[in-house]
Image (cartoon, rainbow, N blue to C red):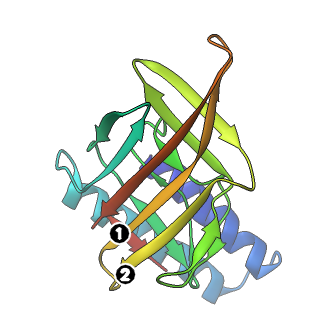
Amino acid sequence: MKQFILVFLVLFAIKTQAQQDSPEFRAKIRAMSAKMQKQQSKSQGKTSGKISYTVNGKTYTETKEVSTVIINGQIGDIANDRHNVSIGDGTPHSFKVGQVYSCKSLTLMVDGLQYSRRSKDNVATITYYDGKTVKGKFSGTVYNEKTKKTLSVSGTFETNNVTVL
């Protein structure tokens, strides 16, 4: 998960710098890399948050390395370390505390099977953010190709494993 976020950050930085090979750009990349390594070593092996969700009256909770990244006021995916429980579609989304935003994609594990769906109807709301901790709620639908079932889901998330750039 950390490597995914680092790659995401590097690609985002490269895009925003429009192929400028300046000393300032290289310094930003080094700073991002150092910050990610520091945060990874600090949180390795610890539970740093959770994603809880309810499907068909049954509640599931994921607590393994839940994290997110915030870049220039936009939030990335809220996900576990394996990215098999994820809120978001891999692109950053603008957010304001208390305001619903379309997270577009939900990926969840239900009874050992992975369910996922991209839809504008999959939404999240950040209910708390203080620069260190993110809390919120989400809802939408997920689908599994094997079972051919679409399931409604609602849940909450919180993490103090937040990288802010």
Say whether residue 54 is left or right of residue 50.
right
Q: Residue furthest left?
A: 46
Quarter-wise, where is residue 101 in the image? Answer: bottom right
Q: Position of residue 107 (x, y in %)?
A: 55, 38
Crowding at mark 2 (Cα within 10 Å: few <14, some 14-19, many 20+): some
Q: Where is residue 70 in the image (x, y as percent from the top left)?
A: 50, 74
Q: Which of 82 and 116 is in front in this view?
A: 116
- How many numbered discs sit on the rendered protein? 2
Q: Which of 13 and 47 is in front in this view?
A: 47
Q: Which residue is drawn at 55% across and 80% down?
A: 99
Distance Cα–Cα, label 1 vs label 2: 7 Å
Asked if labels 2 and 1 touch by Cβ distance under 8 angstroms, the answer is: yes
Residue on which the image places disc 1: 135
Q: Residue at x 56, y 84 (%)?
A: 73
Q: Is 137 situated above or below 18?
A: above
Q: Where is residue 30 in the image (x, y as percent from the top left)?
A: 49, 73
Identity, as a three-letter code, of the amino acid under mark 2 = Tyr
Residue on which the image places disc 2: 129
Q: Which residue lies furthest to the bottom in this view?
A: 24
Question: Is residue 81 at least partly visible in the picture?
Answer: no
Quarter-wise, where is residue 137 in the image? Answer: bottom left
Q: Residue at x 52, y 24 (%)?
A: 114
Quarter-wise, where is residue 136 in the image? Answer: bottom left
Q: Where is residue 7 in the image (x, y as percent from the top left)?
A: 59, 55
Say whether residue 157 is left or right of residue 84.
left
Choose the circle earlier in sequence order: 1 or 2.
2
Identity, as a three-letter code, of the amino acid under mark 1 = Lys
